[in-house]
Image (cartoon, rainbow, N blue to C red):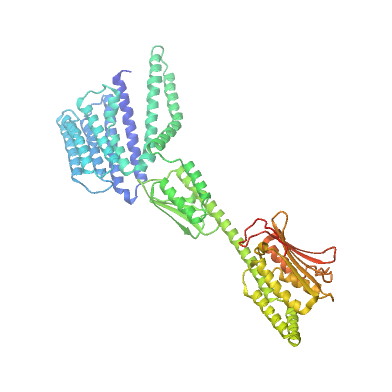
Amino acid sequence: MNSLNAALLVNCIGFAVGMALYGLLGAMVLQHRGQERARFAHKLLLVTSLLGLIWNVGEMSVFVLGDFGTSANLAFLTATAYSALGFLPSVVVHSAQNGEARWTPLTYIAYAVSSFAATLHFVAAASGSVVPSSFGLMVLILGAVSLAVGLVFVYFRQTLTQRAIWTTALLIFAVSGLHFVDKREGSSWLIELVAHQSSLPLALAILYQNYRFAFADLFLKRAVSLILLSMVAFGLYVLVAAPLLRYHETHDRNDVLAISLILILWIATALVYPSLHRLAVLFVDKVVLQRIDYAQLQTELTETFENLGSSNDVLDVASGRLAEALTSEGSKWYEIAERHDRGTATFVDFQPDRVEVFVPTAEPPYFQIELSKFHGGRRLLSDEITMLASISLAAARRIDALRVIHERCEQEYREQEISKLAAEAQLTALRAQVNPHFLFNALTTIGYLIRSSPERAFETLLQLTRLLRGVLRSSDEFCTLGEELKIIESYLDIEKARFEERLTVEIDVSDEIAKMRIPALILQPIVENAIKHGISENRSGGHIGISAEIDDAGEKLVIEVSDTGSGKGDLDVDEPYGVGLSNVRGRLRSYYGPDAGLGLEIDENGHTVATITLPVTSPTGRKTSRPKVARI
């Protein structure tokens, strides 16, 4: 295959690919039309598609009809094709206004240059001169260079990237136009290809400015796939088919074998296309767009959700990251009344100007994320819809988990409040419960002392007042052991006035231990129990001892209340703990759980011993080291 035939073959393939690409561009714009903010861009892209189709179809027709040796005059067809090519730079200038439909002086100049060049082509065709007109092509070349310079200065506020794209596209068009003026057809198949397809950079420039998502996802991927497929088909023909067919012509020809070879290569191109398309997609996503990895985004968001503590935070992060990933200028989330029960696929509802992502929580309230104002007229593809559905499910699962955690916390809080109220009620009952028998006995003793010893009666009355004030004044659940002992001492002083020398008391508690905090009124029912069931039932009275110390492990505070009364204490077989001591044991269980307890026993001397065991705590309620115990 000589260079001329190679150039003609490449031109034919190039024009076929050009028709496919411009046709794809037109179909893409028509399919996604209707977005208000992109209507002007749609019109320009439709015009670009139409001009590109006229150029490629016209030139292809000239090649084909010329090969068939038709006698028809192709001058006007050539003039039409080159006129369509000449108007593409004007459309580029028009689209450089960031989607604004206004006309600027530079726009008028561009269309005037294109119209003048087209007129020269048709005049040449009508006069029988060479078409395209060399003067008309020079006008286009000089006009493209001038327009490139004008764009740089007129649209200086645009980014450097935007200006570079316009300038590069116009200069490529201008340089390639020199080939048509030179008239050296077939000198190089590469020059032929670049020259005849110089309009493509203009179309890509328009797409990049006004339809960036379509440029990348809907057009460029397909365009690259088609170009790769054409290159593979061309390579198979040049490297495989052409040598075999030339060898085939050296001996007996068999057209069936030749046709079979072409069909085999045709099928091979069809089989390799999926791989070529994946390669094109990878190239556009990673190199051109530098698009983020959706699988990685889903993993990162799922991990981020696990560290968030509220539904609002989850929805804020999800909507913000999705808007960033999908180039959305507007994002928000809101509650909705009804759940979407139409399957996972309908979690994502795509509209022309927005997308609604339903967050499928298990229970109301339900939520929906809305993304709008997509950059460059973006359209979601299947992998992006799948990504949105997966992230919405991950967000919903985290919100459900947070709701469960919140409900459990609320339940535990309610249980704690109930337990606290119950403890407070018990404490209040204890304070209000100061044994009526004790009060009656104390008042009877005071009445008796008024007659026999008014001074002792007065002192006993003061002790009773001090006791009642200490019991009823404080509302705290905890107090120090020393404060509790003061109330006990007041109580026992009153009882001494009643029992006189028949009651003796010994309190053995160090100053350090006296600072430890214990539940309020936890000892008073035990001491009262010892007086009631031990001392009062023994005619000779008895002795009450109160002691407190830290166990050998340094972790428990052990308080003992013993009496030498009747030897029965409160150890009744049917109700071993009685009402008062059951109350004490219930309060200990409520405060400390299994770490505290109350025990009653009869020692070897027949004395009743009540033992309270508590965790060692400081006056602030924290664990403390074991203090030194001093007997007093």
Residue furthest bottom as drawn = 451
Relative to the observer, which residue lies in front, 280 or 559?
A: 559
**Quadrant of the rendering where the N terminus is positioned:** top left
Specify whether 144 is left or right of 436. left
Residue located at (72% from left, 80% from top): 439
Is residue 405 visible to the viewer in this orientation of the structure?
A: yes
Relative to the observer, which residue lies in front, 593 or 622?
A: 622
User: Which of the 4 image quarters holds residue 222?
Assistant: top left
Where residue 96 appears, as percent x and y from the top left, is: 26, 43
Specify whether 184 is left or right of 472. left
Specify whether 19 is left or right of 349. left
User: Which of the 4 image quarters holds residue 212?
Assistant: top left
Relative to the observer, which residue lies in front, 411 or 567?
A: 567
**Quadrant of the rendering where the C terminus is positioned:** bottom right
Residue located at (52% from left, 46% from top): 303
Q: Is residue 538 above or below residue 189?
A: below
Residue located at (66% from left, 74% from top): 471
| Label tally | 0
Residue located at (64% from left, 64% from top): 515
Q: Is residue 150 above or below residue 374?
A: above
Relative to the observer, which residue lies in front, 147 or 630?
A: 630
Q: Is residue 292 above or below residue 229?
A: below
Residue furthest top as drawn = 251
Where residue 248 appears, as percent x and y from the top left, is: 40, 15
Where residue 541 appears, as percent x and y from the top left, is: 82, 74
User: Which of the 4 image quarters holds residue 213?
Assistant: top left
Q: Is residue 261 above or below residue 227?
A: above
Is residue 422 visible to the viewer in this orientation of the structure?
A: no
